Amino acid sequence: MICRNCGTEIADKALICYRCGTATTEARFKPVPASRSRSPLIATVVAVIVLIGFAVFVGRSGAGDTPRYVTWAAAALAVIIVGIRAYARRR
């Protein structure tokens, strides 16, 4: 068989040309077109609003007066936001 792209002689059962990488047959399955979702944008906007609210809360309290539960809540919130972003990016 001859490659339809570069003209190199290739094996009859070859799936691709060893020289140029062109497929010898048409693909059986077409890839699903990627749909653009708004969920990553929404997750980002929500995360920014929550972080701004937290910054305002911490800014109003005196230095060193931040209760321990607020620190834990901020750490938990950061973990949740990272998890949501990773989930949204994977989809």
Image (cartoon, rainbow, N blue to C red):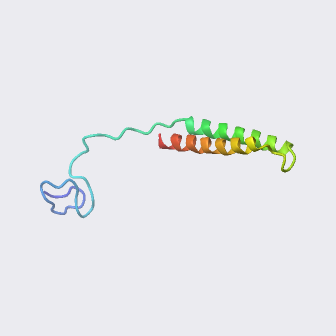
Does residue 52 show up? no
Q: Which residue occupies the foreground of this view, 6 or 68?
A: 68
Q: Which residue lies furthest to the right in this view?
A: 62
Work out which quarter of the rendered image holds the N terminus and state it.
bottom left
So how many labels did they put on this image?
0
Name the residue: 87% across, 46% down.
62
Residue 42 figure quarter: top right
Residue 59 figure quarter: top right
Name the residue: 53% across, 40% down.
88
Q: Which residue occupies the foreground of this view, 86 or 7?
A: 86
Q: Is 87 on the left or on the right of 12, as rendered? A: right
Q: Which residue occupies the foreground of this view, 40 or 10?
A: 40
Q: Is the residue 53 above or below the residue 17 in the image?
A: above
Q: Position of residue 41 (x, y in %)?
A: 60, 38
Q: Is the residue 55 above or below the residue 24 in the image?
A: above
Name the residue: 40% across, 38% down.
33
Q: Is 75 on the left or on the right of 17, as rendered? A: right
Residue 74 figure quarter: top right
Q: Which residue occupies the foreground of this view, 14 or 5?
A: 14
Does residue 12 show up? yes
Q: Where is residue 72 in the image (x, y as percent from the top left)?
A: 70, 44
Q: Where is residue 76 in the image (x, y as percent from the top left)?
A: 65, 42
Q: Position of residue 15 (x, y in %)?
A: 20, 53
